[in-house]
Amino acid sequence: MTSQILAEAERKMLRAVEAMDRDFHTLRTGRASTSLVERIHVDYYGTSTPLNQLASISVPEAHQIVIQPWDRGVLNGIEKAILKSEIGLMPNVDGTVIRLNIPPLTEERRKDIVKTVHKRMEEAKIEIRNLRREANDGLKKEEKDGILGADEVRRQLEQLQKITDRVVADVDRVGGAKEQEVLEV
């Protein structure tokens, strides 16, 4: 049962790192990326639908995103959704496509994005520590119930701490890479 507790805790910790990495893909870095707009929800005939289900999204140049909807009637809806979103880009509608030009980031904006990266890293670390605490409680409960001996619980707690340290190092590695990408001119 204890190996189940450790395996479950590790699986949840790794999912927290994956969620943080997915969130990082939505941050602007000065280069065009389809992930900036894929998760924007558009009102499509009364239904909130992700943009990537309504249009093809491409990056023909390093500083431009082109959105080509499959239904021309949704062009205005996509434009409104982009304006409402927090990406801070102005859509240019060319009849059948929407072009988003990605301006170079200012130094101040880069620092703001780095702060956001650090904030999200800290949230992931807090989530990981909470998962560690839950696993600790589960192991101590098994000791209290007589399922495990004190020595085995101590070994399992040390193993849990090693897992936690490894996953926190992953958070730092992924966050550091994103920070370098943002600061790169």
Image: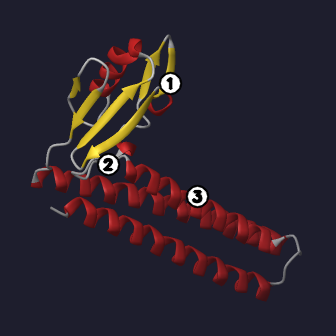
C-alpha distance separating marks 2 and 3:
19 Å
Report crowding for label 2: few under 14, some 14 to 19, many 20 or more residues within 10 A (C-alpha): some
The residue tagged with tag 2: helix, strand or loop? loop
The residue tagged with tag 1: helix, strand or loop? strand
Quadrant for the C terminus, please: bottom left
The front one of 44 and 55 is: 55
Residue 18, compared with residue 86, is above or below; it is: below
Picture quadrant where residue 78 is located = top left
Residue 15, label in figure: 3
Q: Of the residues shown, which amino acid type is indicated by label 3?
A: Arg
Q: Of the residues shown, which amino acid type is indicated by label 1?
A: Thr
Q: Position of residue 8 (x, y in %)?
A: 71, 64
Name which residue lies at 64% across and 68% down.
10
Q: Of the residues shown, which amino acid type is indicated by label 2?
A: Leu
C-alpha distance separating marks 2 and 1:
21 Å
The front one of 58 and 43 is: 58
Name which residue lies at 25% across and 58% down.
114
Q: Give the mark nearer the N terminus: 2 vs 1.
A: 2
The single residue placed furthest to the right in the displayed view is: 146
Check whether the beta carbons of the residues at disc 2 and disc 1 lie within 8 A of each other: no
Residue carrying label 2: 27
Q: Where is residue 2 in the image (x, y as percent from the top left)?
A: 79, 73
The residue tagged with tag 3: helix, strand or loop? helix
Residue carrying label 1: 49
Q: Does residue 70 appear to the left or right of 96 in the view shown?
A: right
Q: Where is residue 151 in the image (x, y as percent from the top left)?
A: 77, 89
Residue 141, label in figure: none
Residue 163, compared with residue 38, is above or below; it is: below
